[in-house]
Amino acid sequence: MCGIIGVENNDNAAVLASAGLLTLQHRGEESAGITISGKEKMKTFKAMGLVSRIFNEEILLNKLPGTAAVGHVRYTTSAKSSLTNAQPFQINCIHGNIAVAHNGNITNFLKIKQMLLRKGAIFNHTSDTEILLHLIAMAKGNLANIVASSLRKLEGAFSLVILKDKTLIGARDEHGFRPLVLGKIESSYIISSESAAIEVIGGTYIRDIKPGEIVVIENGQIKKSFLYKKTKKQNTCIFEQVYFSRPDSITFGKTVKEARVKMGEYLANQMKNVKADIVMPVPDTGYFAALGFSRTSNILFENGFVRNHYVGRSFIKPSQNLRDLTARLKLRPIHEVVKGKEIILVDDSIVRGTTSKRLVNILREAGAKKIHFALSCPPIIGSCYYGIDTPSKDHLIAANNSIEEMRKYLGADSLTFLSLENLVKACSCADKKEKVFCTSCFTGKYPTIISRNTYKEDY
Ligand code: AMP
């Protein structure tokens, strides 16, 4: 998963882009980068690690002069997480200097790459985004047409920000899998994965970039916005609301916090017969669903975990021992809260099951009497091909076990998943009646053709 941001017509473009990236840090902790243009020659600065470690005052103010910027934070967990794959990608081609930052997964990457290799193209990265650069470089016409004709060749999930000189372009795939929003701060437009990144820098959220839309912005003006591909059916990723997006963002027209509270309310209705002393969230994602649960069930809301925010993903590595240590460092139960209690433990999702099993263990050690595990989404039975780094089906616990088998494995007293119907209701906007979500990770039914050649980044 990744986060992207674009800023134009602003003397503080690099500073605003880095503040935006900090707000989007949860979408990718592996590497971060900013490309700047508009004053001097286009320049990219990127490195592995967290935004706050990469961008300091000296770099932002002295090394990145310009009025337009695109930025990217990247999340992977594999060996492929290298500086060469860090974005934005900047190229120099017949059309000049162009930079691209991408969130998503281009599913026909392998097919297009083969075609490009046969034409003599040279690849420097292993990332799917690189094919877009080749397509752009080979296309003819003005900037908007070049981008449009290139994007028409792509399948799968892509929310993009593209930079050339002072021109900023935002574009989304025809399904609208990943979010992308437009905002404004004074006379500058901002494009971001999430609205929170626009508001943090003092801007105002205007609207979502539509599925299949390209928006071309220059000098504080929208020069052009058009649908380069007609949307047959919108398929926005419902897992953004469940887990990925920040609760203070408006994703797909609804505040994520509001959707999560609703998920908790519906869960409470599903679990009317379960008695407990307290409802407890798994921080941070379980927080609002637990709040909704507590309000509906009238069971006391308690914070029984303290989360250590300084334990990064990078700490999780080699042996089982170290992994356990990481889990213990990350979340520590408050014994006084949980001891002797019947607990409804609310988390967002179970992927492999390892985190949930550890959580149950930790709570038992702290003296919890009963643990009723409640999840604010259905069992995940299908891998994601559209940009969420869920593992292959073999590693998805729910794809290979019944709910009772999972309950036993976790060691919980009961295990309840929010039904798909309730999840869709919780995430839907009142004014939208048609089904607009991609729910393939819960149904195994994909909105695009998935075959052996479908590209999925190998996490
Ligand atoms: P596990 O079941 O051990 O794989 O971990 C599930 C937990 O990881 C959930 O509670 C989420 O908070 C978090 N999670 C869910 N999806 C993802 C994802 N795609 N990448 C990283 N963490 C995730």
Image (spheres, rainbow, N blue to C red):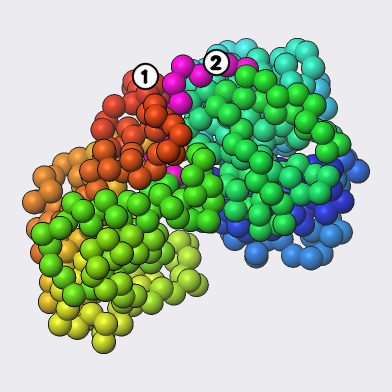
Residue at horizontal 87%, vertical 51%? Answer: 11
Element assignment for label 2 = loop
Q: Residues within 10 Å of mark 2 (few under 14, many from 20)?
A: few
Residue that badge 1 annotates = 449
With 134 as the anchor, is 291 left or right in this view? Answer: left
Residue 94: x and y, percent?
81, 21
Residue 15: x and y, percent?
77, 57
Looking at the picture, which amino acid does disc 1 mark?
Ile
Q: Is residue 129 above or below residue 280?
A: above
With 276 as the anchor, is 17 left or right in this view? Answer: right
Which residue ends up furthest to the bottom in the rendered image?
336
Magenta segment range? Answer: 228-240
State whether residue 385 appears in this view: no
Residue 276: x and y, percent?
16, 70
With 56 as the anchor, is 262 left or right in this view? Answer: left
Upstream in sequence: badge 1 or badge 2? 2
Q: Residues within 10 Å of mark 1 (few under 14, many from 20)?
A: few
